[in-house]
Image (cartoon, rainbow, N blue to C red):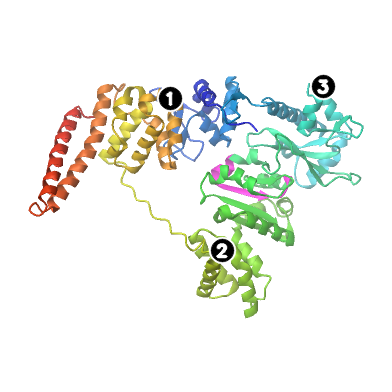
């Protein structure tokens, strides 16, 4: 496996990437004056443009939702790519050959088989066109009838790229070989396989096909449905594991659903390709399905990038399962794997054991939307499912239910959720809430008290950001981020201890951790290095905001403006210390504590002299 991309190459990608060109493919940008651009933010709904792009510094920031960064970060957010995927895509646009650090010595070398992915994706793209053309042939009539019986017309088939693998041993293989793909490439891609005689034949024959795409929209595999009774293969046959197709990471429909998933903060998990199609056509545009494997931890990580956006307490994951025993078992298995974001997990059980495709056929689009709307918390469903195995009208039954449910309750790590479901459990079992609490506490102590010992989160109270002192601190930070060559020495001379607002202190600390403003040359690389040095999301978001916010001066800043700004930052801090010291002196008894009194008085005189000097330095004002 290749290591990380060399830092110099990442910097070169940033340097050679026009952020305006990249963003304008998604956002309509107009001039905002001063060389900046403005448009409607693609990451939240708004009527007035608050999304700003600064081509000169190669950064963007939205004053509406707080998102921001460089071109790499924009692709990560807009197309839901990883950092490496985003860098590789921009490198491809700019014609840059990336190098990867492979060993402990940091020896850079080209990534092994760097062109392999492009070749495999190209082979799949050619296969999609071949299969789609075959769907209109006479031999594909059973495939067309299959789609029609499930309520999908020709437009739906084209929208999802449905195709047909014809009745021939090597028709696709010959077609792709004629296009220049090698024997090994077709085997590696999973499109062809070697027969017993050693000849190359097609992997899929006489089947209806769905192309499976990744987050970026590239086809990386196929799902194939059996159509003929004399086909002795499985009902569904998927592409085998390949360098680009990992079934535990793949979600069918994610390419079409990703923007709505991110926008709505919700993903609906269904069980098959036709269920995804039915949901999308019915208006549930956030539906996705696994491909030949159970929903697991890797799928959760994919969706976390879209739905939860790094937060453990936002967004929704909704499972749809049949209401039969198998569906209940699937729901319980999902619950076992899903503790990481239990609060956002729901289940929607379809009526009469119908999947979304069958439900749409029987009762229409509205019934599919109602199914999702009728969701309930997965843990509630799990508790009811366990309790339903016991006779709750008897004391023995209630005791048995409590014993069975308690292990599930102990997995809840958030105190607020645990308290909520304690009441839910009391309602389901008919056991008094206090008795339930006693049982859970006893079990918790036996389990080491892992859950009960968690403290409640403290409230975070911060001073106002719109005070005059805070606005001056904000201006100083903008100078360091936007004009580091100009502001560097003077800015770096004022320590983080001179800043009073906590988030400003955090950004000032991050600037120092990034090497200081005096060592920077500016631009997107500098901004990103400061963002990377931030210890929390609030300070990282503020860096993005300050990087594009105009300075509070007409024209270009000069050294005098920097000097005035830094003097005002220190003046606020010094005058605050003067006030504190005067208050302290008033509490000192000069008779009993003569030495302490005169030491404090001498310090006060020195601070007041320093304050007068700063006042004179800041006399030009803003």
- Give the secondary structure at mark 2: helix
As drawn, the label of residue 523 is 1
Residue 16, compared with residue 158, is above or below; it is above
Q: Is residue 352 one of those drawn in magenta?
A: no
Disc 2: which residue: 410
Task: Residue 356 in the image: state x and y as whole percent.
Answer: 70, 52
- As measured in the structure, the alpha-carbon distance from the residue carrying label 3 to the one carrying label 1 is 47 Å
- As measured in the structure, the alpha-carbon distance from the residue carrying label 3 to the one carrying label 2 is 61 Å
Nearest the viewer among 529 and 120 is 529
Label located before the other in sequence (3 or 1): 3
Question: Which image quadrant: the N terminus?
Answer: top right
Label located before the other in sequence (3 or 2): 3
Task: Residue 341 in the image: state x and y as whole percent.
Answer: 56, 53
Q: Residue at x 58, y 24 (%)?
A: 91
Task: Residue 427 in the image: state x and y as whole percent.
Answer: 56, 71
Crowding at dot 3, Cα within 10 Å, few <14 / some 14-19 / many 20+, comes out as few
Q: Residue at x 75, y 31 (%)?
A: 128
């Amino acid at each position: 496996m290749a290591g990380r991309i060399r830092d110099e190459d990442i910097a070169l990608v940033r340097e050679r990437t026009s952020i305006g060109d990249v963003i304008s493919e998604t956002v309509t940008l107009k001039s905002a004056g001063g060389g900046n651009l403005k448009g409607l933010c693609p990451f939240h709904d708004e009527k007035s443009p608050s999304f700003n792009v600064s081509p000169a510094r190669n950064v963007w920031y939205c004053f509406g939702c707080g998102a921001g960064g460089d071109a790499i970060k924009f692709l990560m957010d807009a197309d839901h790519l990883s950092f490496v995927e985003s860098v590789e895509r921009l490198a491809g646009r700019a014609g840059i050959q990336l190098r990867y650090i492979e060993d402990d010595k940091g020896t850079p070398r080209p990534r092994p088989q760097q062109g392999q992915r492009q070749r495999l994706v190209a082979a799949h793209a050619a296969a999609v066109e071949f299969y789609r053309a075959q769907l209109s042939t006479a031999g594909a009539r059973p495939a067309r009838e299959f789609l029609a019986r499930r309520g999908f017309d020709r437009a739906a088939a084209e929208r999802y790229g449905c195709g047909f693998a014809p009745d021939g041993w090597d028709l696709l293989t010959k077609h792709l070989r004629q296009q220049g793909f090698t024997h090994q490439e077709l085997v590696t891609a999973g499109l062809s396989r070697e027969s017993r005689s050693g000849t190359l034949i097609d992997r899929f024959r006489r089947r209806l096909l769905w192309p499976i795409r990744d987050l970026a929209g590239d086809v990386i595999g196929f799902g194939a449905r059996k159509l003929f009774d004399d086909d002795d293969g499985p009902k569904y046959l998927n592409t085998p594991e390949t360098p680009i197709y990992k079934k535990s990471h793949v979600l069918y429909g994610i390419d079409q659903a990703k923007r709505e998933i991110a926008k709505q903060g919700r993903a609906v998990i269904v069980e098959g390709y036709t269920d995804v199609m039915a949901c999308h056509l019915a208006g549930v545009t956030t539906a996705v399905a696994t491909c030949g494997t159970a929903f697991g931890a890797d799928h959760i990580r994919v969706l976390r990038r879209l739905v939860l956006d790094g937060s453990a307490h936002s967004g929704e994951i909704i499972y749809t399962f049949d209401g039969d025993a198998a569906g209940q078992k699937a729901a319980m298995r999902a619950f076992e794997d899903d503790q990481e974001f239990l609060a956002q997990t729901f289940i929607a059980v379809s009526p009469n054991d119908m999947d979304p495709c069958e439900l749409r056929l029987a009762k229409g689009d509205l019934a599919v939307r109602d199914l999702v709307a009728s969701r309930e918390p997965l843990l509630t469903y799990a508790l009811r499912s366990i309790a339903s195995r016991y006779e709750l009208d008897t004391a023995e039954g209630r005791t048995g239910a409590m014993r069975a449910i308690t292990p599930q309750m102990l997995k809840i790590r958030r105190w607020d959720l645990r308290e909520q479901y304690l009441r839910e459990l009391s309602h389901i079992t008919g056991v008094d809430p206090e008795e339930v609490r006693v049982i859970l506490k006893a079990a918790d102590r036996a389990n080491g008290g892992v859950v009960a010992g968690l403290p409640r989160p403290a409230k975070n109270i911060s001073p106002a950001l719109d005070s005059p002192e805070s606005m001056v601190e904000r201006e100083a930070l903008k100078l360091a981020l936007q004009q580091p060559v100009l502001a560097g020495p003077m800015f770096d001379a004022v320590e983080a201890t001179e800043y009073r607002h906590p988030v400003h202190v955090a950004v000032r600390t991050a600037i120092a951790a990034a090497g200081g403003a005096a060592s920077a040359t500016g631009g997107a690389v500098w901004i990103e290095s400061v963002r990377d040095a931030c210890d929390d999301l609030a300070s990282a978001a503020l860096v993005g905001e300050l990087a594009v916010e105009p300075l509070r001066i007409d024209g270009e800043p000069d050294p005098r403006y920097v000097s005035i700004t830094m003097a005002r930052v220190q003046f606020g801090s010094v005058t605050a210390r003067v006030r504190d010291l005067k208050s302290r002196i008033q509490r000192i008894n000069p008779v009993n504590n003569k030495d302490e009194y005169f030491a404090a008085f001498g310090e006060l005189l020195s601070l007041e002299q320093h304050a007068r000097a700063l006042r004179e330095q800041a006399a030009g004002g803003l």
